[in-house]
Image (cartoon, rainbow, N blue to C red):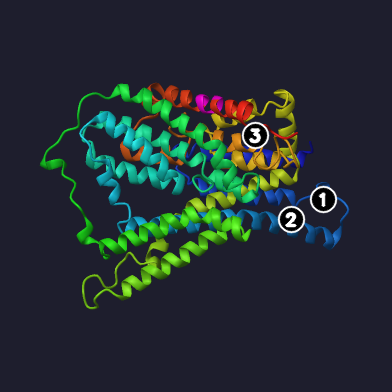
Amino acid sequence: MSSLTIAIVVVFVLGYLFIALESVTKVNKAAVALLMFVFCWTLFMLNPSSYITGFSGQELLNQVSAIIEHHLGSTSTTLFFLMGAMTIVEIVDQNGGFNWVRDVMKTKSKRSLLWRIACLTFILSAILDNLTTSIVMIMILRKLVHEHKDRIIYASLVIIAANSGGAFSPIGDVTTIMLWNKGVITAAGVISEILIPSVVSMVVPAFVLQFMLKGELETGEELHLKSDYEVLDFTSKQRKAIFFLGVGGLMFVPVFKSITHLPPFVGILLVLGVLWTVTEVFYRRLRRGTEREGTQRRVTNLLRRIDMATILFFLGILMAVACLEEVGVLTALGQGLNETFNGNHYAVTGIIGVLSSIVDNVPLVAGCMGMYPVAEMGEMAVDGIFWQLLAYCAGVGGSILIIGSAAGVVVMGLEKITFGWYMKHISWIAFLGYVAGILSYWVIRTYLIVTPL
């Protein structure tokens, strides 16, 4: 390995360290990721001929530009998908589309509420992103459960169920979106074969956690859920239309891709365009001259609420990983892992899943996509064991520690759950579900599905 390659790796590792220590340094991880991106490629340009052979002079520079533009184009498909999905969810949420969830959750039994939370979070996170689902569920829990010691148990289950639900859906988690965009998994393949392991990884922890809850929830006038429908701009029918257009549209995206063979981000932009048009028509029908006119819930205003820091973080980290791919580091690392574990994909992806609870799973998955080429047939083919296990492990493994996923971090902040409490009471339960899911996948692949060689 050349000194220049070592320098690129050092920059990436230092950047990764600062991203992991964001809570200590107070420097936003997006800023660090962008610096990683620029510094890695700047070092690459000091001697590009050592990585790109057969070219010189202007031809070499043109080749480098083509390589960077190729990686940028690949990265942009994921970024536009995320921006479109985030905007759709924001439109549905801000216009009261999720209010019906409260009525579904009403119950007096603590254990009954736990299972309702688990199932609903699991389903929603497969359609929405796990971060948004977690926020919605925590807001509802605050209205249903007043005892904080009980609520943090429910909140912990929200983290587990959200990560499990996102793992089997091509649109449920950033990592599955990346793998789907890359073409290493298909929507039908990941849903059909990862659904059961994902369910197992949620059901096992929920079964254990129910024994930590006893009795019934408090009832009374103070816990009555007041509807906020009257403060919204749209009628009940209009809100339902927005909900079904938004959520139904997200579910339609994989179908659109299979029909048109266009990239997934095209489908998500189609749904956004339709939803945007419908809401504009609804607003035009509102009576003019009322307080509703000039509302802040129009899409043009909601676009300002999109978390651009997250988008820029993904841009920086994915482009930095692309540089590691170009200098050959990822290929060498992938070969080293295969030699260490004798090509056992369960061991490799299982370790990656555990690592994803410590560090961000986005660069881990991006790195794996650069490490391993897609084969024509076998376990490394499209929808092969390796890629499907990677989707499962990177998503579900983030539940083992509370800092291991976006859902965990946001719930940690909202409910003031400490790292130590979660690790002591929940981590082993989440790990149990994680391992049980992998075992169920092994059973499915060994006895129910024959992998072509």
Question: Which three-letter amino acid code belongs to the residue tagged 3?
Answer: Ile
Residue located 88% across and 53% down the image: 54
To which residue does mark 3 refer?
385
Q: Is residue 134 left or right of residue 378?
A: left
Residue 56 quadrant = bottom right
Label located before the other in sequence (2 or 3): 2
Label located before the other in sequence (3 or 1): 1
Query: Residue pushed farthest bottom?
Result: 288
| Magenta stretch, overall SS | helix
- Which x, y percent locates residue 221? 11, 42
Label located before the other in sequence (2 or 1): 1
Residue located 33% across and 43% down the image: 137
Residue located 51% across and 32% down the image: 197
Indicate which label's residue lies in the foreground, 3 or 1.
Answer: 3
Cα distance, mark 3 to mark 1? 32 Å
- Which x, y percent locates residue 303? 42, 63
Q: Residues within 10 Å of mark 2 (few under 14, many from 20)?
A: some
- Which x, y percent locates residue 410? 39, 41
Residue 135 quadrant = top left
To which residue does mark 1 refer?
52
Q: Residues within 10 Å of mark 1 (few under 14, many from 20)?
A: some
Residue 236 visible in the current orientation: yes
Residues tagged 2 and 1 counted as in contact (Cβ below 8 A): yes
Q: Secondary structure at mark 1?
A: loop
Q: Residues within 10 Å of mark 3 (few under 14, many from 20)?
A: many
Residue located 40% across and 47% down the image: 132
Q: Is residue 163 left or right of residue 379?
A: left
Question: Which three-letter amino acid code belongs to the residue tagged 2?
Answer: Ile
Q: Report the span colored magenta.
A: 435-439
Question: Which three-letter amino acid code belongs to the residue tagged 1?
Answer: Ile
- Residue 67 badge: 2
